[in-house]
Amino acid sequence: MKLCLACQRCFESETWDCPRCGHRPILRDRLLCFIKDPPVAGNGFKPEYFAKLARFEEDNFWFRARNRLIQWALGNYFPAARSFFEVGCGTGFVLKGVRETSPRLRLAGSEIFVDGLVFAQSRLPGVDLYQMDARQIPFEREFDVIGAFDVLEHIVEDDAALRQIFRATRPGGGLLVTVPQHRFLWSAIDEHSMHQRRYGRAELRRKVEQAGFRIQRITSFISLLLPFMIFSRMKKSSSRDFQLWKEFEISRLLNALLANILATERAMIKKGLSFPAGGSLLLIAKRPATGQ
Ligand SMILES: [Zn+2]
């Protein structure tokens, strides 16, 4: 169901006009915008970020490995899902990957920054894309699965976003989340990425459960590369002129090597191993089919 953000009325309709109060989202650059005052360039983010990201993520081992893990989790834990909504879809790289492995899913995506959605629009013709704040989601019990991949750590009120995601998930449906892990890995990369936090496992578990979900699986990933991450952060913290994109500028050989290591790790996760530590956390949860 659609949810009117002005009067909180739920409604089923082809259009977005609220049957109670007449409110409807603004159409801006062919995108439905649900935010009154969209964030502007310079206000805590850099507009060139998405252009660079779109260029790097296609080949970079980290983005590719995360996509594979998400595709597996979606197919394995939610084989009957018919719809998938990604909150904070950025340039649409994850949705593009999901469309390749699950072509029958109805896909939708949202992003607070329109600069990301412009890339997503060109990558994902026919997919519903919304400019939206994760703390105000205009849906109720609408999607079989909702994903938020490296999004929650950007949001001050991450618990509010999780409650909204819960409301937009169909009873019996589910949640897929990835976040950066371990406070001791906090570095200039987190600051430049405008992260609010890196998560502890208990903290993520608690916030997801408090939103109403039941955890199905939680594992670290980027675990086999953890020693490299620690080493690289020790090196970085001693250098003054940090550059975010240096992190992605690695040789083809190293990229291939790291991709192979993460493929091994993924095979172990698929077999049921849950890593206790790693650069990131993957969490899979369900909204109970009854109650609430
Ligand atoms: Zn209304």
Image (cartoon, rainbow, N blue to C red):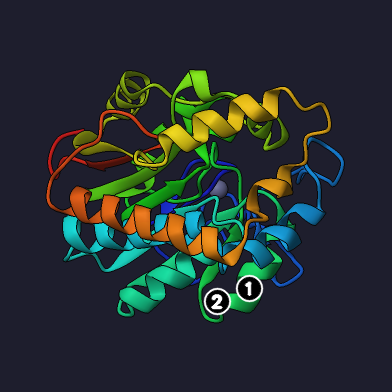
Q: Determine the residue positioned at 53% across, 41% down.
A: 151
Residue located beneath label 2 in the image: 124
Q: Is residue 250 left or right of residue 82?
A: right
Nearer to me, 164 or 66 = 66
Q: Is residue 42 left or right of residue 230?
A: right
Which quadrant holds residue 206?
A: top left
Q: Determine the residue positioned at 32% across, 59% down.
A: 263
Q: Report the disc number at residue 121.
A: 1
Q: Position of residue 172 (x, y in %)?
A: 17, 49
Nearer to me, 275 or 74 = 275
Q: Is residue 205 above or below residue 86?
A: above
Q: Amino acid at mark 1?
A: Gln
Q: Report the disc number at residue 20.
A: none
Single out the residue that lies furthest toward the right: 42
| Contact, mark 2 vs mark 1 (Cβ under 8 Å) | yes
Q: Position of residue 4 (x, y in %)?
A: 52, 48
